[in-house]
Image (cartoon, rainbow, N blue to C red):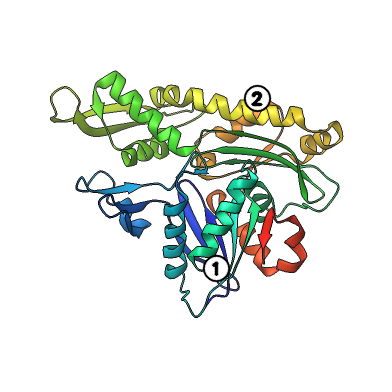
Amino acid sequence: MPRELAIDLGTANTRVVAKGQGVVLDQPTVIALNTRTHDVLAVGDQVYEMIGRTPGYLVAVRPLREGAITDFDITERTIRLLLRSAGTSRMQRPRVLLTVPASVTSVERRAVREAARRAGATASYLIEQPMAAAIGAGLAIHEPVGSMVVDVGGGTTETAVISLGGVVAYRAARCGGIDMDAAIQEHVRQRYGLAISERTGEQVKLAIGSALPFADELHAEVRGRDVATGEPGAVVLSSDEVRGALAELVDLVIATVIGCLADAPAELAQDIIYEGIHLLGGGAQLHGLAERLADATEVPVHLVPDPMGCVARGAGLCLESFDTLRPIFAAADA
């Protein structure tokens, strides 16, 4: 039974890491909520399959929007289900480390810690996601050297410059992979009058989406419901028009990174020019994003191994060196 757990509660996906065991849970951050009783019925993969297919009183919702918790009561019950799925019980209550955006307020931090405690944790600790990402990417966070991480997550893009165990410069934008999916949905609806699901938008993004033109561009057939008639319909999308639908969001990501670089002290900026930018998160897998970012900043960009699991990996490493790394935690309660 795990006694120490790390939870990367992301807008799109949640990962739970147990000390000595690695990732024990990796599921979409979506819950089934009964609107009549306000009960949380399930969480994760089985709920993701329900999106768009549930009766009116049963809805599939995301407890986090744009990287922020929108309902702390639902979040508490979600964490409780996660702890139960990870193998904990009332007799085996774990110590929990949660990742949070660096932009959360002190009130939100206290609320997250309290939600974890009420969900069954004996003690809860927080670590900022950029710091966990830097640890997961294997960067020397305690050295007097500037390291830069760009986390294009599901709901937010976080950019941070880290040195000597702290965040020196930070920028965030309320855009991420889910916003890219929504932009594709809106494009298909506006141009073709076809309503497609969130999942379809994501599949199109992964299949033919890009941040830069590339040779032998692809096409994909998309099926949905005709807005005017209500009948099933289908259209063929090209990589070029999907890239156009995503252009505004990609530009926002780039502007966020450039702004963070401008905020960094000159000495650390020199380190970043030499060491490069470390790109991670689900949105980082958009074809050509690393190259586009490198062109815009004139700084090398490295896509980290397993970009989606980098934050969870860093949080898991914190469990292995808990006492040593505890000073970098954002907050804690005993």
The first of marks 2 and 1 along the sequence is 1
Where is residue 319, by image quadrant? bottom right
Residue tagged by mark 2? 296
User: Where is residue 86 drawn, in percent x and y?
Assistant: 46, 69
* Comparing labels 2 and 1, the label whose residue is closer to the camera: 1
Check the image and report above or below for 108 versus 124: above
Residue 247's mark? none
- Residue depicted at 46% across the width and 74% down the height: 87
Query: For this rendering, which residue is in front, 80 or 82?
Result: 80
Q: Residues within 10 Å of mark 1 (few under 14, many from 20)?
A: many
- Residue depicted at 74% across the width and 55% down the height: 328
Q: Is residue 143 visible?
A: yes
Residue 121's mark? 1
Query: For this rendering, which residue is in front, 28 or 204?
Result: 28
User: Where is residue 55 drawn, in percent x and y?
Assistant: 19, 48
- Residue depicted at 71% across the width and 27% down the height: 298
